[in-house]
Image (cartoon, rainbow, N blue to C red):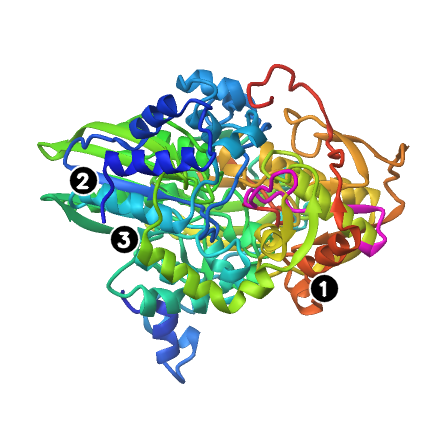
Amino acid sequence: MSMNRRDFLQVLAVAAAGGLSLHSNPSEAAKAATRMYDLPRFGNVSLLHMTDCHAQLLPIHFREPDVNLGIGPMAGQVPHLVGDKLLRHFGIRPGTPEAHAFTYLDFVKAAKTYGKVGGFAHLATLVKQLKASRPGALLLDGGDTWQGSGLALWTNAQDMVDACKALTVDVMTLHWEATYGEARVKEIEEKDFKGTVDIVAQNIKTADFGDPVFKPYVIRNINGVAVAIIGQAFPYTPIANPRWQVPNWSYGIQDDNLQKVVDEARAAGAQAVVVLSHNGMDVDLKMASRVRGVDAILGGHTHDGVPAPVIVKNAGGQTLVTNAGSNGKYLGVLDLEVKGGKVTDFRYKLLPVFANLIPADPAMDALIKKMRAPYEGKLAEKLAVSEGLLYRRGNFNGSWDQLILDALLAEKNAEIAFSPGFRWGTSLLPGDTIRMEHLLDQTAITYPWTTVTMMTGEQIKTVLEDVCDNLFNPDPYYQQGGDMVRVGGLEYTCDPMGRMGGRISDMRLGGKLLEAGKTYKVAGWAPVSEDAAKAGGEAVWDLVARYLKGQKVIRSRPLNLPALKGMAGNPGMA
Amino acid sequence: MNMQRREALKAGGGLGLFGLLAAAGLITPSQARAEWNKSAFDAKTIEETLKALGATGAQSSTDIQITAPDIAENGAVVPVGVVSALAGVEVIALLIEKNPNPLAASFTLPAGTEASVQTRVKMGQTSDVIAVVKVGGKFIMTKKEIKVTLGGCGG
């Protein structure tokens, strides 16, 4: 089916009649909504880009960060802008659906007004409409697609594999996919995806001889134009995630090899070259400045919803760098005009996917219902009711993480708790029931064990410094793209502009300074070492579920945030 | 996709790895017979090591490239390569600044050899890795930081 303007208006009218007040001014909202999806075709090559959906098949809420700091040369630069600074930079009017899609501003009210975002059934309708209006268009998936929900974990990613085939994904690259293990990824590539979806990754090699594990790139003919899609998997997968899950694969940024692949693709006749990347935006921006001959880098990993591309000049001309957010919230549309063997012009739009404005595709809807059916009971289990907003995203802490930390402290009887700075995890509005599905949205990983470790004050500082450098190293090639580890019980001061090993200070427990040689009881989860995997431990969702059921009603609780040094006036902070 | 070398080696059956490599002409038994510079390998600091190598005062140069990951996947086996396009390279030494004994490897190149070496080094912590090259009787050097991290918490 394809959608036209009238369909959208009808949907909108129904929504308005049902009490959904868009902007409390239906005609203005109708115009805004129609404009949003009324995207005139441009050029002769179109690429649709989704990334980091984290297995969210149904519409959800996702609050964008109010802290997304850029350090050194990245300070105040895209994507390190939040709230009204982001709106101003991209010329988005406050109070519009776009302002809600791209910022945390007035989140609860706007979320109630505009409704949920994403969902594969709605995404499918939009993809069909865009593929119909843009013959030959490809759908590219930047990865982090198979992980992030209970259903994906329990089906060993089969739900997402089937949904992506139904969504007509053409080419994808990888990150969290690898946490299902090498064998599972290759099985999906060689069986499920055979003849439909190409997995590309120029930077995954065998650890022994450096042979390619996946195709580095594919060339597709779009309206007579040869277009190369090169894959760039998340370069630090075996570091940020358990190495034992990919023991025979070696990663890395490998921009010298990327240059070789670009040159090879050009020599093979590619007139347009696009890198489908899971580097994270800062790494993509640096890579774009170093590699010649790439027309666009369609990026993900850092979950930055960036409304317009950054144009990076380099020795080969220029490269567009985009980032398409997360959780199925957006679909990127890149239209290229290719003339005389090269890209001469472009249009780009990052479309927010408002579930209330795009009807569900019936076939995808039926597929999702069928896949969920055996698990509905477990997913729907009621754990507690939240009085406040629950969200995760942000450099230092979120209310969902605070809840997990409080659960770890209480259930493990620990003095300090650590929770990983993941950027995925959906949001719940005040008054929402917390169901098992929502808890799994925050925790569903293949190494979910909770841990208790006796650590010295010095070791605790080492951990905080290590993670902090992965976030704030002034050279993006030394970053890993997650947020700061969330900390319970312990107060500290953070100087993001400090040097490696010198950013964390004034660590206090109950007001008393931590002693370097003293031992403290620290609870955590998601250990990456193979020893931790062998040791096992209670899964974090079981521990938190028990805590939530005991609490019944979750009151809004203060976030444990570090005191920040030197960040006043940084546009990456509210 | 082409069969990967690991598969080819498995398929090679009874013939051992070194047999295959030798058969392929990749290693020859006469290699690795360079003189062992004990004092250089025992040295505890960069200065002592450079002195023992006779490389004190080596000038920084852009004619040497270190190929290595920015962040090590496994500190126990970090792949590091050194390449130089200069003619007449005699020695390539690899130093890890923060290791207890910085000198990790020293390669003596016979005349006419392409100056390109690859090895695996062990690193306990984030450190500069220094490549020292002897060419035309003079020493030059370059360095690159390799980060060794605890891991976890990504994405």
**Disc number for residue A538:** 1
| Chain identifier of the residue bearing label 1 in the image | A
Q: Residue at x 18, y 32 (%)?
A: A41
* Residue A154 place in picture, x, y as percent: 53, 66
Q: CA distance from mark 3 to mark 1?
A: 39 Å
**Disc number for residue A170:** 3
State if disc 2 and disc 1 touch (CB < 8 Å): no
Q: Is residue B54 above or below residue A315?
A: below
Q: CA distance from mark 2 to mark 3?
A: 17 Å
In the rendered structure, which segment of residues is drawn in magenta?
Answer: A411-431
Q: Residue at x 45, y 60 (%)?
A: A249
In the rendered image, residues at marks 2 and 3 fall on the same chain: yes
Q: Is residue A115 above or below residue A544?
A: above
Q: Quadrant of residue A190?
A: bottom left
Check residue A424 for magenta coloring: yes
Q: Residues within 10 Å of mark 1 (few under 14, many from 20)?
A: few
* Residue B77 place in picture, x, y as percent: 56, 56
**Disc number for residue A3:** none
Q: Is residue A363 above or below residue A99?
A: below
* Residue A384 place in picture, x, y as percent: 70, 51
Q: CA distance from mark 1 to mark 2?
A: 50 Å
Question: Residue at label 2?
Answer: A133
Residue kind at label 1, given as amino acid type: Glu
Q: Residues within 10 Å of mark 2 (few under 14, many from 20)?
A: some
In the displayed structure image, the side of residue A344 where residue B50 appears, left or right: right
Residue kind at label 2, given as amino acid type: Ser
In the displayed structure image, the side of residue B76 where residue A27 appears, left or right: left
* Residue A49 place in picture, x, y as percent: 33, 42
Check residue B14 for magenta coloring: no
